[in-house]
Structure formats: structure tokens, C-alpha cells
Image: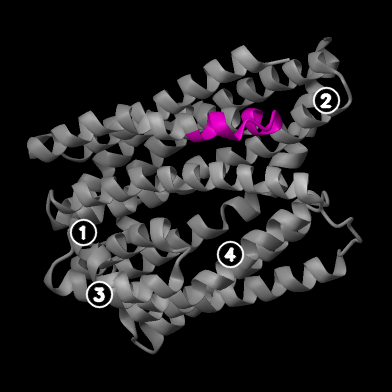
């Protein structure tokens, strides 16, 4: 294709990706704000938050069970004494907001399915601004501490869920009742994606558990580094939306050449964005930790962790874009397999960090980099063999 056609496709990719970013980054922004506000309360509160937010990533979809299992989950992740108490309290309050969060996910998916990508962006921005205001008021004004941070996020999640519900009702369209074959296909795809999602949570969960066993300073620093890195890297997931949309559209129109061209441009843009975010992450590493805590030891380790994490940003970009491409060809089994197998690339290095604590947070981030590299390699191989 010509250079003009390439530029036009790039513009269309960004036109979908940028509005999608707001909805994708909503939850990571909640967590980042929590970390920034709670970090100034002290080392113990920051460590409690690290344990609680990690447990929520894996078990949040079972909010009722989460209330009962909070102490066990926190202990499994390495929480003890005051950190355990704070983590359990935060988890139990946050469980109230989990149903609202998943209403928001459903509403976001509904609106994007109707090609409305601006409404989710507006809702995400408004909810995050509300979250900041509420957390500052409850944590420092009312002096509820860590619990205030949790209640502020729950309130923002409730408002977002109501906004998505209202927007979805306004956008409602009549759809045909699905038949038995469609329901079977849907359930099969849902099972494969559920297994993939659970597998996706295993690595962050294990990472926090390992950091907790390195000590309270390492755990607090990892919380800061992970939240900053995750917010930046998950923004690259926005590129998966146009990759999936344009690939599936091209295949539906019987144009495999357009699908392959979209894949090449999406990967190229992803790697460019990943390299840019690597530089941004490295630059932020030198100044950002001080915004999250006054503890010099935590600041130092967070800076080191962020500098190493910067190297993984291009790998994250590649993994996210390839996710979108594989979704575009509806190969959910390949996505599940890649997520499960990539854990085996992560586990040996994580085990070494547990055995040799001197490897510290850089060792954890090397393990995460191996995980992302394995995901990218497996998904890339599948795309090359299955591409039309």
C-alpha cells in the first residue's frame, strides 16, 4: 500500500485507540490515586494497600467470598500484624464496590460494541476526578486513613456504574434472541477467556507475594513501581481495540490482505509507543517515587524498580497488540494457551528471587519481562501460522 494509505490507517487506528484509553485506564487510575494518597500515611499503610489491591485483582469477581476470605488471602500474600489488619479492612470495604466495577465493565463493552467510544472516556475521566476529590476529603479531611481511600474508590465506582447504566439504556437497540448454537459458542469462548483471565492474575499475585517476603520496604516500593508501570503499560492495550476491530472487519469483508496490513501497522505503532513509554517510565523513575511516599528507602527501591521496568514496556506493547490481533480472528483457545504457558517463563526467575533475596526488585522485574516476552512469542507465532 502507498504511504498515504499507511498514514490514513494509522490515523484510524489512533482514532479508536485514544478514546478507548479512558475506559481501559479507569481502574489503574483508581489504584494509582490510592497509592499516591495512602503512601503518605506511612510504610505500613502502603504495604497494606499493596496486599489488598493485588488480592482484589485475582479474587475481586467473587466479592461475597472476598469478604470471608480476606484474612486468608492477605496472609497468603505475606501480610502480617498491622499490615494484615489494614489489608483485610481495605479488602472488605473494596468488596462493596466490586459489583459496581463489573457493571462498568459490562456497560463499557456494550457502548464500545455500538461504536460509542467517547461516552466511556467521559465517564472514566469524571469518575477518576471524583475519586481524587473523595479520597483527599476522606483520608486527610475526615481522617479515615486507609479505610477512607477504600470508601472513596467504592463511591467513584458506584457513580461510574450508574453513569454506564444510564448511557446503556439510552443506547439500547433491539437484538435477536440467540439460539442454542450461539449460546454454546458463547459459553465456550467465555470459558476460555475466564481461564485466561485467572491465569493473567497469577503473575501479579505472585509478584506481590515475592516482594512481601523481601521486606516492607521492597513491598511498598513494588506497589509504587507496579502502579506507575501498569498505568503506563495498560494504555498500550488501547491499541488492541483497533487491531481487533479492523482485523475482524477486514476478514468479515473477505479482505485478508487488509487484515494483514492492519496487523503490520498495529504492531509497528505498538512498538513505537512502547519505546516512547520506556523512555517516559525511565524519566519518571527519577522523580515520581517522591510523590507517593516520604520514606527515602522506599523511594530509592521504587526508583530502581521503575528503571528496570522501563525495559519491559516494548514487550508489553507487543503482547497487548498481539492480543488484539488474536481476538480479531476469534482464537480464544490460543489466548488461553499463551497465558498459561507464559507463566512457566516467569516462574524460574521468581523462584530465584525467593531463594536469593539479593536479586531484589530488579529480579522481580526481569521475571515479569520474561513473562511478557513469552506471551508475545506465543501469540506472535499463532498469528503467523493463522493469519489469513
> Viewed as shown, does residue 383 lie left or right of 15?
left
Residue at the spot 20% in from the left edge and 65% down from the top edge: 43
Residue depth check, mark 1 versus mark 3: number of the one nearer the observer: 1
Residue indicated by mark 2: 250
Seen at 89% across and 57% down, the residue is 175
Instruction: Point out residue 168 in the picture as x, y percentages from the top left corner.
Output: 79, 66
The residue depicted at 70 percent of the width and 54 percent of the height is 109
Residue occupied by mark 4: 102
Q: How far across and how far down the image is residue 37, in percent? A: 37, 69
Instruction: State yes or no: discs 2 and 3 in contact (Cβ < 8 Å).
Output: no
Residue located farthest toward the bottom when viewing the structure as drawn:
142
Name the mark nearer the viewer: 4 or 3. Answer: 4
- The mark nearer the N terminus, 4 or 3, is 3
The residues tagged by marks 1 and 4 sit, at their Cα atoms, a distance apart of: 25 Å
Give the magenta part as a residue range.
325-336
Image quadrant in which you'd find residue 328: top right
Give the CA distance from mark 2 to mark 3. 51 Å
Placement of 192 over or under 2, stated as above or below: below
Amino acid at each position: 500500500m502507498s504511504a498515504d494509505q499507511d498514514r490514513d490507517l494509522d490515523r484510524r487506528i489512533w482514532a479508536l485507540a485514544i478514546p478507548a484509553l479512558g475506559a481501559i485506564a479507569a481502574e489503574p487510575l483508581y489504584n494509582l490515586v490510592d497509592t499516591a494518597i495512602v503512601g503518605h500515611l506511612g510504610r505500613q499503610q502502603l504495604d497494606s494497600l499493596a496486599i489488598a489491591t493485588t488480592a482484589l485483582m485475582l479474587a475481586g469477581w467473587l466479592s461475597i467470598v472476598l469478604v470471608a476470605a480476606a484474612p486468608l488471602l492477605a496472609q497468603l500474600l505475606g501480610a502480617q500484624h498491622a499490615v494484615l489488619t489494614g489489608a483485610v479492612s481495605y479488602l472488605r470495604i473494596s468488596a462493596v464496590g466490586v459489583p459496581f466495577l463489573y457493571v462498568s465493565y459490562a456497560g463499557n463493552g456494550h457502548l464500545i460494541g455500538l461504536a460509542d467510544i467517547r461516552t466511556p472516556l467521559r465517564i472514566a475521566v469524571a469518575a477518576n476526578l471524583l475519586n481524587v476529590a473523595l479520597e483527599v476529603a476522606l483520608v486527610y479531611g475526615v481522617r479515615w486513613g486507609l479505610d477512607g481511600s477504600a470508601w472513596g474508590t467504592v463511591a467513584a465506582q458506584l457513580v461510574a456504574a450508574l453513569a454506564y447504566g444510564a448511557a446503556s439504556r439510552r443506547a439500547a437497540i433491539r437484538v435477536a434472541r440467540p439460539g442454542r448454537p450461539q449460546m454454546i459458542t458463547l459459553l465456550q469462548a467465555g470459558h476460555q477467556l475466564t481461564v485466561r483471565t485467572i491465569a493473567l492474575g497469577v503473575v501479579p499475585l505472585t509478584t506481590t507475594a515475592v516482594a512481601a517476603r523481601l521486606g516492607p520496604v521492597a513491598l511498598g516500593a513494588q506497589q509504587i513501581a507496579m502502579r506507575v508501570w501498569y498505568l503506563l503499560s495498560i494504555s498500550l492495550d488501547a491499541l488492541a481495540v483497533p487491531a481487533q476491530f479492523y482485523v475482524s472487519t477486514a476478514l468479515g469483508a473477505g479482505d485478508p490482505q487488509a487484515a494483514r496490513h492492519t496487523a503490520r501497522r498495529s504492531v509497528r505503532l505498538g512498538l513505537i509507543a512502547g519505546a516512547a513509554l520506556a523512555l517516559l517510565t525511565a524519566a519518571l523513575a527519577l522523580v515520581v517515587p517522591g510523590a507517593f511516599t516520604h520514606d527515602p528507602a522506599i523511594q530509592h527501591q521504587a526508583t530502581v524498580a521503575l528503571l528496570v521496568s522501563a525495559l519491559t514496556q516494548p514487550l508489553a506493547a507487543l503482547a497487548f497488540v498481539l492480543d488484539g490481533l488474536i481476538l480479531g480472528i476469534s482464537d480464544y483457545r490460543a489466548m488461553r494457551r499463551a497465558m498459561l504457558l507464559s507463566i512457566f517463563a516467569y516462574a524460574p526467575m521468581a523462584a530465584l528471587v525467593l531463594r536469593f533475596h539479593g536479586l531484589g526488585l530488579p529480579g522481580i522485574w526481569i521475571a515479569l519481562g520474561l513473562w511478557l516476552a513469552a506471551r508475545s512469542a506465543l501469540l506472535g507465532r499463532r498469528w503467523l501460522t493463522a493469519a489469513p
